[in-house]
Every structure is written in structure tokens, then in C-alpha cells.
Amino acid sequence: MLLTEIDHVAIAVKDLEAAIAYYQSAFGATVDHREVVESDGVEEALLKVAESYIQLLTPTRPDSPVAKAIEKRGEGLHHIGYRVNNCAEALAAMIAAGATPIDKAPRPGSRGTTVAFMHPKGSFGTLIELVQE
Ligand code: CO
């Protein structure tokens, strides 16, 4: 088994502050990490749940993939991050299994992670991110 943990569930939101406040008041959640990822055009807030995270994501520019996702489908579940020990190995295994890579090779993600995204087409409708810490 190449997956070691659900790393994060990513939720696209229009108003990051409002979403954080909601998770704080509803669940007592606290922000564990916050980061602007310029290359992806997003700002994220990570709320820790045991060894996983809820990742609240908001676009920082109109041409970011998250902005397009919100425009197309509204706010909500955007992708699932699966934690792996070796991103390159898991990426190769997914491609061999017929998945369509968005990233042809692992690349830097937030928190100093190494990541690769797989297209929902070929992965039963779910945008999958492989996350190596
Ligand atoms: Co992610």
C-alpha cells in the first residue's frame, strides 16, 4: 500500500477569513499553518485534525485553477491529498494504473512538501494530489 495517510481534504472557498471563522466557531479548529502559494495562485489555511488537515483554499488571482473551479462548480470540495512516502514512486504507479497526470514529475508544494496532481478524468472524478512530507 503506497498511501500512508489522508494528508488533507481541500475545500475551495471565496472568503478565507470567513471559512476559518466558521471552522473555529463550529469545531474549535485552529490554524496550524498558513501560506500563499504563488505558483498555484492560492492562499491556504491548514486546520489540523489528528494527523491530517482540512485545507481551506482561496484564489489569489482570477486565472488560478481554484478561481476557475469556484466559477465552474461553486465553493466546495476541490481535491483530496493522499500522503505517500515517495511521490515519484506513487506517481509512476498511478500512471501505470491508467491515471492522467497533471504534473508529469513531482514538484514543490506548500509546507515544504513534494506533490503531484492527477486529473479527475481517469481517477473516478476526483482531483488527487500525492503529498510527500
Ligand atoms: Co492540496
Image (tube, rainbow, N blue to C red):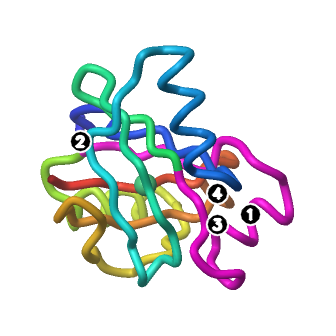
In terms of image quadrants, where is residue 37? bottom left
Give residue 2's mark: 2
Region of the chain picked out in magenta, as a range? 57-83
Mark 2 vs 1, N-terminal side: 2
User: Which of the 4 quarters of the picture holds residue 124?
Assistant: top right
Specify which label sits upstream in the sequence, 1 or 4.
1
> Quick one: quadrant of the N terminus?
top left
In the rendered structure, the answer to whether residue 74 lies left or right of residue 43 reads right
- The answer to which of marks 2 and 4 sits earlier in the sequence is 2
Give the Cα distance between marks 2 and 4.
Answer: 19 Å
- Which of disc 2 and disc 3 is earlier in sequence? 2
**Which one is in front, 58 or 4?**
58
Q: Crowding near pointer 2: few (<14 within 10 Å), some, many (20+)?
A: few
Q: Separation of disc 1 and disc 4 at Cα?
A: 12 Å
Q: Amino acid at mark 2?
A: Leu
Q: Which mark is residue 66?
A: 3
Secondary structure found at label 2: loop
Q: Amino acid at mark 3?
A: Val
Question: What is the CA distance from the residue labelled 2 to the residue labelled 1?
Answer: 28 Å
Residue type pointed to by label 1: Ala
| Residue to which mark 1 is pinned | 69
